[in-house]
């Protein structure tokens, strides 16, 4: 085979190798959170505890992403039923309430994955490497998104029935409609429902304090997220501040 | 001498088309076979579908193309069938309680909402197309107070085939996701604690809760 004939496959292989590494996702091992017993909130016969993934390093380890940059708040929730009656805890019944009064409902895994996105740029790859670049980058991005969705689904807090003595845990994702740079004083409202009678009780679980991101100035109103749901958001705050949160 | 220029032009055109992308209106046609069994709940329920629900469209870009799913219209044709299998009788209503225009024989009103939707496309058309949809269901008493609100997630996956149809396979995967959600609604509605309490308040006899029981039939 002549040199020119070898050059094309070699170039394709090279481009494929480069682009394949652009968007990839390797599911991480489940990070079991052992929340100290002293941090559990107990009411009647149920208990709950929470831990927020505030630090970029922990976010990267568990979710292979900078969640702060993506405006995603991930909170590990653990629940326990200490009573005799079966209790139900639904993901959609959990609520994040900030110290300033804003509150947010959880986002679904697929919405979260779409928000986090993949690092590869199909258009950029196309501009740099042509059609082959587009195809290879698209393939890598698709595979990464599927793997990320499966992994986040595995880690997510799903609707859970708890019999006596049972515990359940998982991650609840929130996508605030306005920037959240710190969660000091924030609480997670966790609702338990008796499976038989629908009698419910809500436990307020305080979240650990700490900066979530640093406030950075933006020149346009790009801080708001029109796709997120908020029960009582304050959009005016984001529009007037002209700021957003970025990773520390 | 013109050939290289022509090749470059064609190549550039293809690349431009790939990058600029197209918009695909996805055909949706979810279906629900008629159930042979009795409805799960022996009550007459009003069905309210808001205009936001009926006209809901999900639009997203993947592979440089825009994919538009008219989920509202499809769901508005599917969900009434699911409600008919879940409740003894359903009546379409144009308003939520406590509106005075509601029929007198309904015990509650149910309202479906589309909360979340996502889809994936395979790299090669013979690969697997997948979709996930999350519905929220609200039930309101005739005095207007919501007494139950819960979510149901449906998933669907479908392998594609070689051909020039770009919209068919994402649509069929979305159909499967909507149908899956409808089945889960039918199977699970009588297990929602707040629905169970509502039924108890209306005098229904309900067995003790057993989470492992897939379906609980409730009769008055």
Image (spheres, coloured by chain):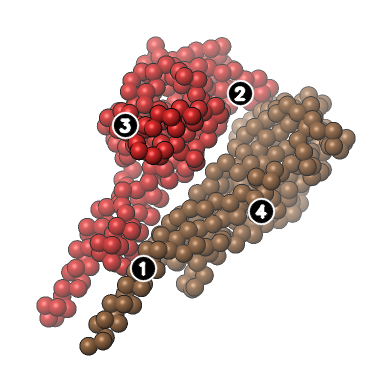
Chain colours: A red, B brown
* Dots 3 and 2 on the same chain: yes
Mark 4 or 3, closer to the camera: 3
In the picture of the structure, the residue carrying the numbered disc 3 is A216
Q: Are discs 1 and 2 less than 8 Å apart at CB? A: no
Q: Which of B123 and B216 is in front in this view?
A: B123
Determine crowd level at label 2: few under 14, some 14-19, many 20+ residues with C-alpha closer than 10 A. Answer: many
Determine the image quadrant of residue B122: bottom left
Please give the name of the residue rendered at 65% of the width and 54% of the height, measured from the top-left corner.
B74
Determine the image quadrant of residue B121: bottom left
On the question of residue B216 being in view, the answer is no
In the picture of the structure, the residue carrying the numbered disc 1 is B16
Residue A115 on image: x %, y %: 41, 43
- SS at mark 1 in the image: helix
Determine crowd level at label 3: few under 14, some 14-19, many 20+ residues with C-alpha closer than 10 A. Answer: few
Residue B142 drawn above or below residue B64: above
| Marks 1 and 4, the one that precedes in the sequence | 1
Mark 3, chain letter? A
Q: Is residue B46 left or right of residue B175?
A: right
Residue B136 on image: x %, y %: 62, 38
Please give the name of the residue rendered at 17% of the width and 78% of the height, measured from the top-left corner.
A5
| Marks 3 and 2, the one that precedes in the sequence | 2
In the picture of the structure, the residue carrying the numbered disc 2 is A193
Mark 2, chain letter? A
Determine crowd level at label 4: few under 14, some 14-19, many 20+ residues with C-alpha closer than 10 A. Answer: some
Residue B161 drawn above or below residue B33: below
Residue A62 drawn above or below residue A196: below
Residue B120 on image: x %, y %: 46, 54
Mark 4, chain letter? B
In the picture of the structure, the residue carrying the numbered disc 4 is B73
- SS at mark 4 in the image: helix
Mark 1 or 2, closer to the camera: 1
């Amino acid at each position: 085979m002549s040199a020119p004939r070898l050059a094309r496959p070699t170039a394709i292989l090279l481009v494929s190798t480069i682009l394949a590494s652009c968007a990839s996702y390797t599911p991480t091992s489940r990070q079991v959170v052992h929340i100290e017993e002293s941090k559990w909130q107990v009411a009647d016969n149920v208990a709950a505890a929470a831990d927020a993934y505030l630090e970029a390093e922990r976010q990267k380890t568990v979710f292979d992403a900078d969640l702060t940059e993506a405006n995603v708040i991930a909170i590990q929730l653990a629940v326990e039923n200490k009573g005799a009656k079966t209790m139900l805890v639904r993901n959609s019944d959990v609520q994040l309430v900030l110290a300033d009064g804003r509150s947010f409902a959880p986002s679904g895994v697929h919405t979260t994955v779409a928000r986090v996105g993949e690092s590869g740029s199909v258009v950029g790859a196309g501009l740099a490497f042509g059609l082959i670049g587009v195809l290879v980058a698209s393939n890598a991005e698709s595979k990464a998104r599927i793997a990320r969705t499966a992994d986040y689904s595995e880690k997510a807090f799903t609707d859970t029935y708890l019999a006596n003595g049972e515990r359940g845990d998982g991650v609840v994702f929130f996508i605030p409609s306005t920037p959240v740079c710190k969660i000091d004083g924030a609480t997670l409202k966790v609702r338990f429902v008796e499976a038989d009678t629908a009698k419910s009780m809500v436990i307020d679980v305080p979240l650990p304090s700490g900066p979530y991101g640093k406030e950075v100035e933006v020149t346009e109103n790009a801080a708001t997220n029109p796709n997120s749901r908020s029960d009582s958001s304050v959009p005016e705050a984001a529009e007037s501040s002209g700021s957003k949160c970025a990773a520390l | 001498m013109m050939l290289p220029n022509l090749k470059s032009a064609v190549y550039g055109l293809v690349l431009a088309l790939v990058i600029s992308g197209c918009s695909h209106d996805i055909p949706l046609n979810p279906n629900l076979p008629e159930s042979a069994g009795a409805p799960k709940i022996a009550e007459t329920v009003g069905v309210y579908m808001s205009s936001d629900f009926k006209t809901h469209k999900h639009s997203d870009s993947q592979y440089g193309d825009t994919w538009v799913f008219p989920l509202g219209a499809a769901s508005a044709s599917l969900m009434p069938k699911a409600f008919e299998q879940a409740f003894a009788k359903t009546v379409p209503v144009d308003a939520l309680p406590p509106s005075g225009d509601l029929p007198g024989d309904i015990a509650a009103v149910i309202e479906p909402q589309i909360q979340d939707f996502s889809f994936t496309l395979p790299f090669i058309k013979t690969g697997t197309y997948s979709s996930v949809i999350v519905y929220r269901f609200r039930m309101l008493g005739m005095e207007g107070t919501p007494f139950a609100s819960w979510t149901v997630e449906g998933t669907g996956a479908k392998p594609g085939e070689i051909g020039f149809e770009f919209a068919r396979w994402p649509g069929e995967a979305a159909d499967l996701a909507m149908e899956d959600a409808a089945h889960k609604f039918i199977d699970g509605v009588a297990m929602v604690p707040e629905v169970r309490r509502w039924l108890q308040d209306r005098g229904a006899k309900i067995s003790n809760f057993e989470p492992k029981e897939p379906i609980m039939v409730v009769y008055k």
